[in-house]
Amino acid sequence: MITTEIFYILLLTAIALLAARFFGFIFYKFKQPAVLGEIIAGVILGAIVLFYFSGQKFVLFNSYTFFSPNLNFHSNEFNLLAEIGILFLLFISGLETSISKLKKTGKSSVMVAIGGVIAPLIFGYISGILLGLSTIESIVIGLILTATSVGVTIRTLMDLDVLDSEVGATILGAAVIDDIIAIVLLAFAMGGIATIADAAMVGIRIAIFFLVFLYIGLKVIDKVLDISEKIHLPKAFLSIALAILLIYAFFADKAGISGIIGAFVAGILIGQNFRAPKITNDAKAVGYGFFIPIFFVWVGTTMWKDGNFLEDSSLISIAILAVILIIIGVIGKIIGCGIAAKITGLSNRESLQIGVGMIPRMELALIIVTAAISKNLISTDFAHIILASTILLTIITTLITPILIKATFKNK
């Protein structure tokens, strides 16, 4: 029997999905990532639906409370849906990571990826320390700035008809590699690093997890998927792939390196199977059709704290941190990626174009900050500040990148 409270959650979920698609469509029409619209949908829903945080209730026909004051977008049930959305994002990312293509990635992409991780990580860490944050909070700020989301970059390069150029190919390869590096570094952070000994122990746990589960995956997953071929049931491949995802996420969490790392590893392993395209399409249908929009709406609703849109005292802190993140985020990628590209023999102009193309942050930056918050790596008082600042970072870097790319290619 489904309880009344579960129906409240189902109603909130339906509202979230409809709002996500509506605002996502609006942003898409303006040639912006739909993800931004989904986050804005969450912010707006926080104002419309969560008003009863202040003690008010919306009464239908003066006798029945339409929304239960005990249920909201931050209930355990809705949080679970959002966290599954994170698992799907990393799983799909792993599915789309081609090991064979990475092997063929040129020296320039590898160097650019490394430079694009090291510089922002160092700049972010130093900025955090100077702001008086703890070591782990400063590391998280650095990690937020490492990963690149090149969806906007790709579209802009396509519009300029230079996606197939050396610059375009280098950006595409580097973006995949720096995401992988960021995820591995996130695994270290999730393990809790306070001393060199802690770092060593986390490194050992990560190495054991990757060695054991990569080995098991390479030996077993193909055989398991072969068996699923004999199961003449609808979407049998998808069911077994999702089971593998959940199993890997479980054991990664038990290993102390976060379930999202396990989801990514599961995606990489399944992605090497010849059935991967079909599984990827089905996983995207489930993920992007339901769980992933819920995650981004949830991110938007977190802007509301105890029924208020952040706090007046927090707005200045958010503005300061957001400006710092944006500045060092832009400079870090231009310097790190640009210098690395120059070392590989590219021209000054091409190096600048690559650095600019690597500026946008999006999904992985939000995943890193929300994962850090869920693992209590960030203090409660600072959590909403860094999350709000990260959202502003993703919005601003997404908006300015096309302008900067077109400027660097001007008169070419």
Image (cartoon, rainbow, N blue to C red):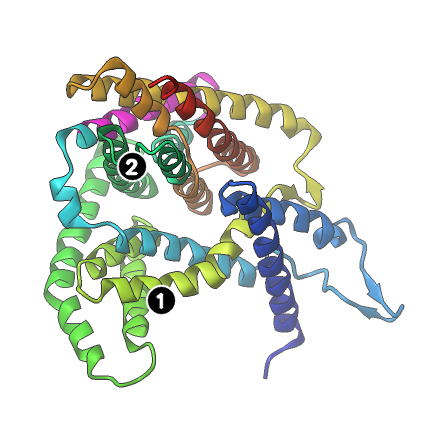
Residue 157, how many percent across, how many down?
A: 36, 33
Q: Main secondary structure of the magenta part?
A: helix
Q: Is residue 132 magenta?
A: yes
- Return the residue at label 1: 282
Position of residue 86 in the picture relative to residue 346 (left or right): right
Residue at 64% x, 72% y: name it: 7
Q: Secondary structure at mark 2?
A: helix
Q: Which residues are magenta?
A: 111-133
The answer to whether residue 337 is seen in the rendering is yes
Give the amino acid at mark 1. Answer: Asp
For this view, does 214 lie left or right of residue 144? left
Q: At which x and y percent is residue 361? A: 42, 35
CA distance separating discs 2 and 1: 24 Å
> Is the residue marked by circle 2 packed among few (<14), some (14-19), or many (20+) residues within 10 Å?
many
Q: Position of residue 349 (x, y in %)?
A: 29, 16
What's the amino acid at mark 2?
Ala
Residue 369 magenta: no
Reply above or below: 38 against 115: below
Q: Quadrant of residue 27?
A: top right
Q: Residue at x 38, y 53 (%)?
A: 89
Name the foreground residue: 163 vs 74. Answer: 163
The image position of residue 247, as x and y in percent, is 28, 65
* Closer to us: 366 or 192: 366
Q: Residue furthest right?
A: 62
Q: Is residue 214 left or right of residue 59?
A: left
Q: Secondary structure at mark 1?
A: helix
How many numbered tags mark residues here?
A: 2
Q: Earlier in the sequence, mark 2 or mark 1?
A: 2
Image-quadrant location for residue 76:
bottom right
Q: Report the residue marked by disc 2.
A: 175
Horizontal side of residue 300 vs 117, given as left or right: right
